[in-house]
Amino acid sequence: MTQTPSGGTPSTLVASDLDRTLIYSAAALALDDVPDAHAPRLLTVEAYQSRPQSYVTETAAALLARLAAHPGALFVPTTTRTREQYLRIRLPGPAPRYAICANGGHLLVDGLTDEEWHAGVRRRLAAECAPLAEVTAHLARSADAAWLLKERNAEGLFAYLVVERALMPDTWPKELADWAAPRGWTVSLQGRKLYAVPRPLTKSAAVAEIARRTGAATVLSAGDSLLDTDLLLAADRGWRPGHGELAAAGWGAPHVTALSDRGVRAGERILGAFLDAVASPVREPGPVREPGQEAARAEARSAARGGAAGPAGAARSAPRPPAAP
């Protein structure tokens, strides 16, 4: 079993994306190949406007409850959702002590924002990126009402659009990304949502801060989108499902397992892998890393050591230095 440091703090931090990684909307279940009579039983983990919104399989629910209660693991939900959106979710098992919302903009401790962390994030975004108002104005000018369904401001940190994918030109996200890059912003298309996010705003920097506070020696992670790349690169081990932006791009790294499972069944596989890794922390010799991949991973760690939030970062050296945002 994983050893727990003195004081009872788990030594393995498990930081996982939620939507389309552990939890799934009805549209993202990917059960079309399963006869109705053999479809897995589902547990609702989120309601929105009094209607079921997100699900896990019963098997995944049991695995998640075990992981959340495991004495050797600290499970940290790590999401691009706003705080309001995250707090709608009711995951199986004990309530997480820590959670990361708004792509790292909010570090929650027992459900409340760590204001010092958030203030540091705000200062860095103001110093390094074009202001949100400039980005939202460009989105309003360039998006077409024929396929734009909603515009959203995520807690004054980033913006996202809800779009009709079938009507939106395939070239538009790339054109937006090209415009955003020199202004310090990145673009991610996930299902019907297109995100414009400041490059320094990353999940991995907040994960590095939690690891620093808790003394966790190992970080495991999982995610499916471009906004999870830094999280995966900065972890000791990671997993990505067979769907999503990263799978579509064929993205990978030597320490990240690319699963073939898609949809809600991928959530089961990821949770099972987390539990196996927590129970068997001895590392096997890994494959030789390509120089470019190792450089990208080193950049991720270096960014977090300096409190950076991107493009990737979550230092895993021990002891971990302070990681002010």
Image: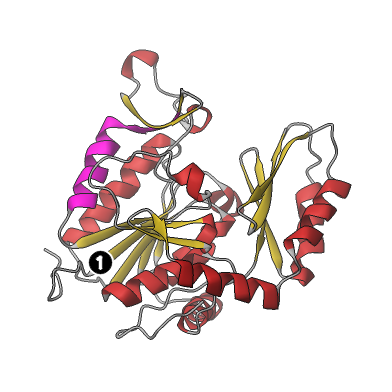
Q: How many residues crowd around disc 1 within 10 Å: few (fewer than 14), some, or many (20 or more)?
A: many
Residue drawn at x 81%, y 40% is: 169
Residue 161 percent across, percent down from the top left: 70, 43
Q: Which residue is mark 1?
A: 12
Q: In the rendering, at what x and y percent does residue 6 appear? A: 12, 76
Seen at 22% across and 38% down, the residue is 62
Observer-nearest of 24 and 298 = 24
Q: Is residue 300 above or below residue 45?
A: below
Q: Looking at the picture, tell me which residue is in the foreground, 32 or 116.
A: 116
Residue name at image x 69 percent, y 76 percent? 128
Residue 207, x across and y down, in percent: 41, 67
Instruction: Indicate whether 244 appears above or below 216.
Output: above
Specify the quadrant of the image occupied by residue 167: top right
* 142 left or right, relative to 307: right
The answer to whether residue 20 shows anywhere in this view is no
Q: Disc 1 on helix, strand or loop?
A: strand
Q: Is residue 119 magenta?
A: no
Which residues fall within the magenta stretch? 53-69
* Helix, strand or loop: magenta stretch: helix
Asked if residue 188 lies left or right of residue 257, the reply is right
- Image quarter of residue 36: top left
Kind of residue at badge 1: Thr
